Image (tube, rainbow, N blue to C red):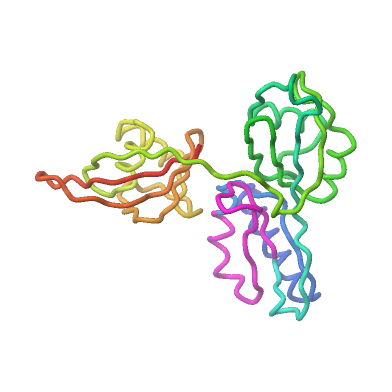
């Protein structure tokens, strides 16, 4: 059975368990492609409330939680927590990357689906994960590359990460998805089309393979291997009918 079918089966099992046993259930951390599968089958799971939870506004990885206070009459605890990884000696700390932190977590034997996004802010990183993974990190993660670190579980309001954006603006032939992707990442329309066909493009969490899809202001577009951007304001059209658009690329 394909992984896609296995995930659909798992989503159905969790939704039915939540409904019949009156308890909250949840998935592992899903990547964007897996989230698109969830959104595809969500219309068949209307008998139970469900939503994605990633821990912050612009999440890439998230868990699906089945159940709600309105449905069950009690508020369940979200199993997702956040840990802060900071250097023991700030003076000697390296400027570590997302890859460095992920590699250190994998070295501990933690599987990728057990952790969500890793947000890096200068010499500090915030990792969203399950409670039991946070306990492992607090006990066992002592070094990332050559930097000694300390791990502390924190409340969501203690996350001091502010998403940064790089503004990019220009004219596109139209608001077609492939045209806007080309502007965002400096690609040819041919390469944008290849990314779409390769199932690497998501708009508002939904997988799209057609370049003729028209994007709108406020849409969030994610391209695997390149990044994510928000479609900002639209300006006036040129005399030749080209559309001026402002994009906000997540840094």
**In this image, 82 relative to 212: left or right?**
right
Find the magenta span and give its range. 36-65
Q: Residue at x 79, y 37 (%)?
A: 110
Residue 183 coordinates in the image, percent (x, y): 32, 37
Residue 44, by quadrant, is bottom right
Q: Residue at x 37, y 44 (%)?
A: 247
Of the pair 75 and 92, the residue shown nearer to us: 92
Of the pair 152 and 9, the residue shown nearer to us: 152
Of the pair 101 and 198, the residue shown nearer to us: 101
Residue 72 coordinates in the image, percent (x, y): 75, 79
**In this image, 240 relative to 232: left or right?**
left
Residue 193, by quadrant, is top left
* Vertical placement of residue 173 versus 109, above or below: below
Q: Residue at x 10, y 44 (%)?
A: 240
* Vertical placement of residue 128 versus 20, above or below: above
Q: Is residue 81 magenta?
A: no
Query: Is residue 199 something that shows in the picture?
Result: no
Q: Is residue 56 magenta?
A: yes
* Vertical placement of residue 108 versus 153, above or below: above
Residue 26 coordinates in the image, percent (x, y): 73, 60
* Vertical placement of residue 195 versus 216, above or below: above
Q: Residue at x 69, y 49 (%)?
A: 29
């Amino acid at each position: 059975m394909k992984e896609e079918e296995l995930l659909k089966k798992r989503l159905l099992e969790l939704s039915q368990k939540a409904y019949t046993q009156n308890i909250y259930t949840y998935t592992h951390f899903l990547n964007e492609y897996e989230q698109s599968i969830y959104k595809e089958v969500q219309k068949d799971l209307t008998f139970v409330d469900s939503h994605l939870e990633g821990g912050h506004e612009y999440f890439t990885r998230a868990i699906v939680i089945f159940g709600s206070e309105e449905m069950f009459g009690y508020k369940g605890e979200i199993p997702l927590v956040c840990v802060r990884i900071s250097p023991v000696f700030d003076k000697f700390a390296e400027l570590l990357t997302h890859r460095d932190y992920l590699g250190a977590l994998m070295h501990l034997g933690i599987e990728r689906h057990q952790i969500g996004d890793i947000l890096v802010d200068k010499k500090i990183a915030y990792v969203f994960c399950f409670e039991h993974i946070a306990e492992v990190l607090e006990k066992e993660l002592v070094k990332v590359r050559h930097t000694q670190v300390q791990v502390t579980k924190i409340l969501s309001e203690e996350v001091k990460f502010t998403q940064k954006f790089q503004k990019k603006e220009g004219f596109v032939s139209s608001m077609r998805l492939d045209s806007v992707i080309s502007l965002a990442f400096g690609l040819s329309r041919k390469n944008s089309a290849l990314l779409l066909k390769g199932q690497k493009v998501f708009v508002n969490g939904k997988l799209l393979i057609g370049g003729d899809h028209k994007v709108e202001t406020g849409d969030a577009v994610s391209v695997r291997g390149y990044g994510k951007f928000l479609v900002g304001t639209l300006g006036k059209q040129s005399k030749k009918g080209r559309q001026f658009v402002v994009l906000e690329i997540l840094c």
